[in-house]
């Protein structure tokens, strides 16, 4: 027996959606089976298919790959997808067309398509670690592909989420065959970029993000059977028809499972496998181990053309935009710097292509958010892998983004858009900003006197996550825009709202947040949500952030608070593009928890990961000329549409 990874858990949005769909009638099942069979025949008539090709790495460990290439002499450029997920074409004795669809998109356009499992996943040998380390596995895969007689020596990496997150770090190795990146929903590959110590979406503002707690339950290494190493490729391809090496993980109610204390035992309590989680949860934001794996950091080189896909309700749009701007400015060559482009959709994680004529994200309709992503992606690949002068770069804006509320695709020469003007709104109240019915307001003039707002944060009764910019937490958090009015009945949420905008206003870019706070505990968290309030009171969340007080002076040290002392805290900035129509208002919520989007601070100054008991924090938000708590909004002046 070898230690090996398990199958992806049902924490993904796709799996969650499947659970809600009733079984198809028999006739529909038969029709789908016939369609799948016809599609399979189409691909096999036009492609040379090699399944379970075992590609050796420099240490002798072999990675399993499926190869699809057009029939004909070639040579062909290669679209490469590396994944921790199951791409086997047979599941439970039935053909599964997913891998064939991705392959056909490439093959019909004259590309070879290679999909490979990360080390330690399914048919790939070795032991798994997050992002498929060691990093050299990616380099060795490029080396193998470039040497194939049917290859033209040019490889593009393509994928979303786990198939994107490894791309940036391996690009830093600068293999000559690695020609371009198409990275979508890539936040878990972002380590440290400037002031963002994201460390692969593990942290935000020094507070742990809990998405990986649920995700790792189904992915991190466990014990599983492995075929003998002397089987031929043909034998492996044959047995893969009835053994896909994908265990069926018992489902977990993560709405309850993530509440378990201490957090270090959450996966053990769910009877999950051991693996990277038990080490990662003990790391601090600047732990040296974050710099030894597969994350991309801002001290690593980058010299590849890339197109970056993001979405407003993904878990890490802010850090992703920071990485885009970093490589746009700092890529090694002028050619690479000139060929960085971004697309920002109004969807959840990796949901770009699921946009419809009436795209609903959570509860909010954002209109027709569709885009022809296939044309864009393959136009990009045709230019960089085939050398086609197709005019794409003559018309492609540096940044294409979707403005919610206006429900339009727009473009900019940079991010944030150069025409955005920063307008500062100050927090103000008579000292009673608690709840929706409090007296909190946002004004463009700092208040004279300090009448601080107070609330008690009890880690045993944290503010529940309601909507948001999330991924991969199973049933624990529903992502997207949800009406926050019911949440704003809580006494531990401070609510600050602007006057209505008579003509509407567009907020597009980076939203800065500074709070002046004090507490009676040595450490606590502060959270902020940005909200669009409609004339009827509906309050849709746009973005959210958090800051752990002990890291207010940097992530390389912990500086605890003295009771009663006032401190200035700069929170990780927000990112959005939203049209606040006539009569709409801008609102922010301030609290100290957003759980289980973020792990709760127990307020003790301890490790948080090994604690079972917390203390109640009595927190204050100050607002005056001396303590000007504020948000800085990037405003673009446009006529109302």
Image: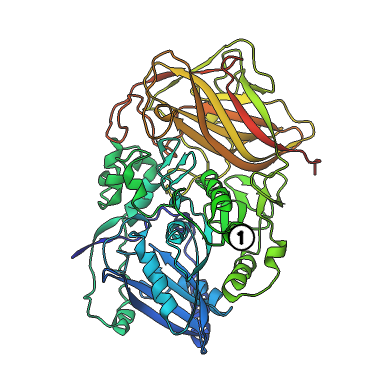
Residue plotted at (59% across, 41% down): 575
Q: How many marks?
A: 1
Farthest residue to the bottom: give it: 73
Residue plotted at (28% across, 30% down): 612
Mark 1 packing: few (<14 Cα in 10 Å), some, or many (20+)? some
> Relative to the observer, which residue lies in front, 2 or 295?
295
How far across and how far down the image is residue 563, in percent?
39, 14
Residue plotted at (52% across, 49% down): 323
Instruction: Name the image quarter holding the N terminus.
Output: bottom left
- Residue 545 visible within the image: yes
How far across and how far down the image is residue 12, in percent?
44, 54
In the displayed structure, 113 sits above or below 581; it is below
In the displayed structure, 361 sits above or below 67; it is above
Q: Which colour scheme appears in the figure?
A: rainbow
How far across and how far down the image is residue 132, in percent?
35, 60
- The residue that label 1 is drawn on is 339
């Amino acid at each position: 027996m070898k230690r090996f990874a398990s199958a992806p858990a049902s924490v993904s949005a796709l799996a969650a959606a499947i659970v809600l769909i009733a079984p198809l009638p028999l006739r529909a099942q038969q029709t789908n089976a016939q369609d799948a069979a016809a599609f399979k025949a189409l691909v096999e008539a036009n492609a040379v298919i090699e399944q379970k090709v075992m590609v050796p790495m420099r240490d002798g460990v072999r990675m399993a790959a499926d190869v699809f290439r057009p029939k004909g002499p070639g040579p062909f450029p290669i679209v490469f997808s590396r994944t921790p997920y199951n791409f086997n074409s047979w599941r439970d004795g039935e053909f599964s067309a997913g891998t064939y669809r991705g392959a056909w998109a490439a093959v019909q356009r004259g590309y070879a398509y290679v999909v490979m499992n990360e080390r330690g996943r399914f048919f790939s040998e070795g032991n798994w670690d997050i992002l498929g380390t060691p990093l050299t596995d990616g380099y060795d895969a490029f080396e193998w592909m470039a040497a194939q007689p049917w290859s033209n020596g040019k490889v593009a990496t393509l994928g979303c989420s786990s198939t994107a997150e490894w791309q940036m770090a391996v690009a830093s190795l600068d293999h000559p065959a690695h020609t371009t990146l198409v990275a979508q929903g890539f936040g878990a590959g972002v380590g440290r970029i400037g002031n963002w110590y994201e460390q692969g979406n593990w942290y935000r503002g020094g507070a742990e993000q809990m998405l990986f707690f649920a995700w790792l339950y189904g992915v991190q290494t466990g014990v599983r059977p492995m075929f003998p190493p002397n089987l031929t490729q043909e034998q492996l391809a044959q047995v893969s028809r009835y053994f896909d090496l994908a265990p069926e993980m018992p489902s977990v109610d993560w709405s309850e499972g993530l509440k378990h204390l201490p957090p270090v035992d959450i996966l053990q309590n769910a009877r999950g496998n051991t693996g990277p989680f038990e080490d990662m949860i003990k790391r601090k934001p600047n732990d040296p181990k974050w710099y030894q794996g597969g994350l991309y950091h801002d001290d690593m080189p980058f010299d590849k053309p890339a197109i970056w896909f993001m979405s407003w309700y993904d878990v890490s749009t802010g850090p992703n935009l920071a990485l885009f701007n970093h490589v746009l400015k700092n890529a090694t060559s002028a050619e690479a710097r000139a060929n960085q482009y971004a697309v920002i959709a109004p969807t959840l994680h990796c949901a770009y292509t699921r946009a419809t004529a009436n795209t609903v994200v959570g509860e909010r309709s954002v209109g027709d958010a569709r885009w022809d992503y296939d044309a864009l992606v393959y136009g990009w690949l045709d230019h960089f892998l085939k050398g086609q002068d197709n005019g794409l770069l003559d018309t492609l804006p540096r940044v294409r983004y979707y403005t919610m509320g206006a429900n339009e695709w727009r473009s900019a020469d940079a991010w944030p858009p150069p025409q955005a003007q920063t307008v500062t709104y100050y927090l103000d109240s008579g000292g009673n900003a608690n709840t929706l019915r409090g007296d909190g307001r946002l004004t463009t003039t700092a208040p004279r006197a300090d009448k601080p707002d107070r609330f008690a944060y009890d880690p045993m009764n944290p503010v529940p996550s309601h909507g948001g910019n999330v991924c991969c937490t199973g049933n624990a958090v529903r992502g997207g825009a949800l009406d926050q009015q019911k949440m704003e009945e809580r006494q531990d949420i401070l609510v600050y709202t602007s006057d209505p905008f008579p003509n509407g206003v567009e907020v597009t870019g980076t939203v800065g947040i500074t709070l002046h706070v004090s507490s009676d505990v040595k450490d606590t968290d502060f959270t902020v949500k940005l909200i669009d309030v409609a004339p009827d009171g509906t309050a849709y969340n746009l973005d959210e952030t958090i800051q752990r007080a002990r890291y207010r002076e940097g992530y390389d040290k912990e500086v605890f608070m003295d009771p009663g002392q006032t401190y200035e805290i700069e929170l990780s900035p927000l990112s959005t593009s939203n049209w606040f129509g006539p009569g709409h208002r801008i609102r922010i919520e301030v609290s100290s928890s957003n759980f289980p989007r973020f792990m709760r601070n127990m307020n003790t100054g301890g490790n948080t990961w090994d604690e079972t008991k917390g203390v109640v924090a009595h927190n204050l938000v100050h607002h005056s000329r001396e303590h000007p708590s504020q948000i800085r909004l990037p405003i673009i002046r446009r006529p109302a549409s």
